[in-house]
Image (cartoon, rainbow, N blue to C red):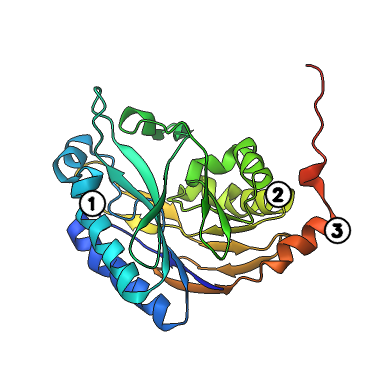
Amino acid sequence: MRAALVQLSVSEDPAANLPVTVEFIRQAAAGGAGFVLTPECTNLLSSDRAHQRAVLAHEEDDATLAALRAEAERLGLWLLIGSLGLKTHDADGRFANRSFLIGPAGQIVARYDKIHMFDVDVSPTERYRESEAYRPGTSAVLADAGFAKLGMAICYDLRFPQLFRRLSQAGANVLTLPAAFNDTTGAAHWESLIRARAIENTCFVLAPAQCGTHAAHAGKPRRTHGHSLAVAPWGEVLADGGTEPGVTFVDLDLARVAEARARVPSITHDRGFDGP
């Protein structure tokens, strides 16, 4: 299976972001990809809560979701929409950060709501509180894409290896990690963590990313790391999307998962223990 990682640098305007995303998906299909992945925050990247309330929609009304489902059906491919910001019916008004697996008939095969919220102080001047706007998901998701079993995760989930262990032991052979990874932490940790998740779970990891500087109509612009990555079950980096928007291709040979697990079958070696 040929996969394609779409790297974006989205704005705060979902309507402006959509045609760029669609064009990259079409480029991916023209390049032979049967599985295309977009990054976290495919519809917008914004820290302005009032703006988010004004432009986001519920899942059933979201124009980006509808258009990308239609494009997947038109092209006859599998599409992982890395995530969309969506309104919910929660009493506190928080949004969902939701990833979708779309099948070749345009159907929603699986949904995953990001479990771990990015509530961090990267530096004295760089503070994030994702949980103030987004409510965390509560369920891990293993999705059957026909050609592979996908363990779905999003961005900050990367730092919680127990999630990926559960997914791989449940049958995942490809882990998807769409991201809008912070530029500072990305430079320090992104590749190391992705390679670790691939190695310890003997899975492919496909991580499409946001990149560059994201202009904001209010407040400080946000920077994301880019470097969409595809990593093999043995830990080799198969593809790196660099720092500009575009499409990066990788050919997946799922026999490599079985080969890696035959050499080091660590996902069958977990043991319980006492303490600390």
Residue 77 % position (x, y): 41, 71
Where disc 1 sits, the SS reads: loop
Which numbered mark, 1 or 3, is in the foreground of this view? Answer: 3
Which numbered mark, 1 or 2, is in the foreground of this view? Answer: 2
In this view, the residue in front, 182 or 164, is 164
Label 1 to label 3, Cα distance in Å?
46 Å
Q: Which mark is residue 201?
A: 2
Q: At 39% across and 34% down in the image, what residue appears?
A: 128
Residue 141 in view, yes or no: yes
Q: Give the mark nearer the N terminus: 1 vs 3.
A: 1
Q: At 33% across and 38% down in the image, what residue appears?
A: 96
Label 1 to label 2, Cα distance in Å?
36 Å
What is the three-letter code of the residue carrying label 1? Glu
Residue 123 in view, yes or no: no
Where disc 3 sits, the SS reads: helix
Quadrant containing the C terminus is top right
Q: Give the mark nearer the N terminus: 1 vs 2.
A: 1
In this view, the residue in front, 112 or 149, is 149
Is 213 situated above or below 270? below
What is the three-letter code of the residue carrying label 2? Asn
Residue 50 falls left or right of residue 128: left
Q: At 50% across and 68% down in the image, what residue appears?
A: 241
Where disc 2 sits, the SS reads: helix
Residue at mark 3: 263
Quadrant containing the N terminus is bottom right
What is the three-letter code of the residue carrying label 3? Arg
Is 96 situated above or below 75? above
Residue at mark 1: 12
Q: Residue 37 appears in which quarter of the rendering?
A: bottom left
In this view, the residue in front, 217 or 116, is 116
Q: Residues within 10 Å of mark 1 (few under 14, many from 20)?
A: many
